[in-house]
Image: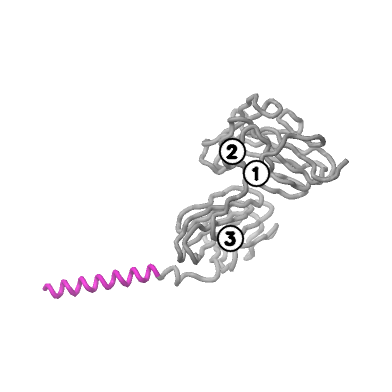
Amino acid sequence: MKRIISFLGLALLLTLVASATAVSAAPAAQHSAAWTGFYFNNMYLQGSPVFTRDDPYIDFNWGYGGPGGGIPGTNFSVRWLRWLYMDRAGNWTFLTITDDGVRVWVDNQLIIDAWYDQPPTQHTATRHLTQGYHLVQMEYYQHLVNAEAHFQVRYGAPTPPQPQPQPGPQPFDLAIDTRSPYFSKGGDASGWNAFANGYYGIAYWTYNNLFALYRYNWARWNLPPTRACHYEVSIYIPHRVATTRQARYWIAHNGRFDARTVNQAAYTNQWVSLGTFDFHGRGGEYVSLSDVTGEPYLSTFLVFDSVNFAPRCTMW
């Protein structure tokens, strides 16, 4: 009887060892040189995919077209899966640029969550990973207009440069404050709070939103008609109001959009440069800021004050 029990115990042990070996080998067995892409004809990854294909890279700019397979250029979604091999242990940075929404998981942990409409926008996340295979999943949806999706992974944890404080408006600058006819705001009127600590007097603050909820608050500083030029765009951060680290400014200039994220909490009574951009000066160009930061709902304050457009070319 003891021999039978011993034999059964040995068999069970061998079975467990074999199972463990199969699990550890699974990533290598499933690894391929391409992503497996599941393409859906809706924005919600619902139902069965219209088609599945291998994509060597996630690096698409479909424009106004669709990804193929009869899927139109709007209202579609994609899920990509792949085992990626990290050749060393350490910090790895994951980068996406999408128009519109994106989510990324690494080993079933959500690291990028920007599931909302947006112009082409970069998002990054850094995680410490062991050497070996890791399961990466990226989800994407396209709503309207342009369709674009890009993914990269890099070794290391980059430290993005922080915008530098700048002097105030100079002669020939175009400064737009909250009392200017070229300033506008919208959303939930009860969410706007005025205070007398702005650069020219009145500024506003709101709580943040996690994503673009109904009647989220936004403001826009319009560049008045002027001559075509490169302008350095700066925003003013007044004293002891802002706590957000993820204020997302959009610069609409010369037919394109650029985004800049500013840690408003790092500045007090300072002008902060967003960079220099080319403007055609015919109207319809602006800087905008909404309360959508991606931070936990109603956890931080955003401040809305003056924006300065400083010419960086010979105008007069």
Using the image as rendered, state which of residue 97 and residue 78 is in the foreground: 97
Q: Which residues are magenta?
A: 1-24
Q: Is residue 147 left or right of residue 13?
A: right
Secondary-structure class at tag 2 = helix
Residue 90 is one of the magenta-drawn residues: no
Q: How far apart are labels 1 and 3 at the CA level? A: 24 Å
Q: Position of residue 166 (x, y in %)?
A: 70, 39
Q: Earlier in the sequence, mark 2 or mark 3?
A: 3
Secondary-structure class at tag 1 = loop
Crowding at mark 2 (Cα within 10 Å: few <14, some 14-19, many 20+): some
Camera-side mark, 1 or 3 = 1
Badge 1 is on which residue?
163
Camera-side mark, 2 or 3 = 2
Q: How far apart are labels 2 and 3 at the CA level? A: 29 Å
Crowding at mark 3 (Cα within 10 Å: few <14, some 14-19, many 20+): few
Using the image as rendered, state which of residue 71 and residue 160 is in the foreground: 160
- The amino acid on which the numbered mark 3 sits, given as a three-letter code, is Gln
- The amino acid on which the numbered mark 2 sits, given as a three-letter code, is Ala
Q: Main secondary structure of the magenta part?
A: helix
- The amino acid on which the numbered mark 1 sits, given as a three-letter code, is Pro
Residue 266 badge: 2
Residue 3 is one of the magenta-drawn residues: yes
Q: Position of residue 35 (x, y in %)?
A: 55, 66
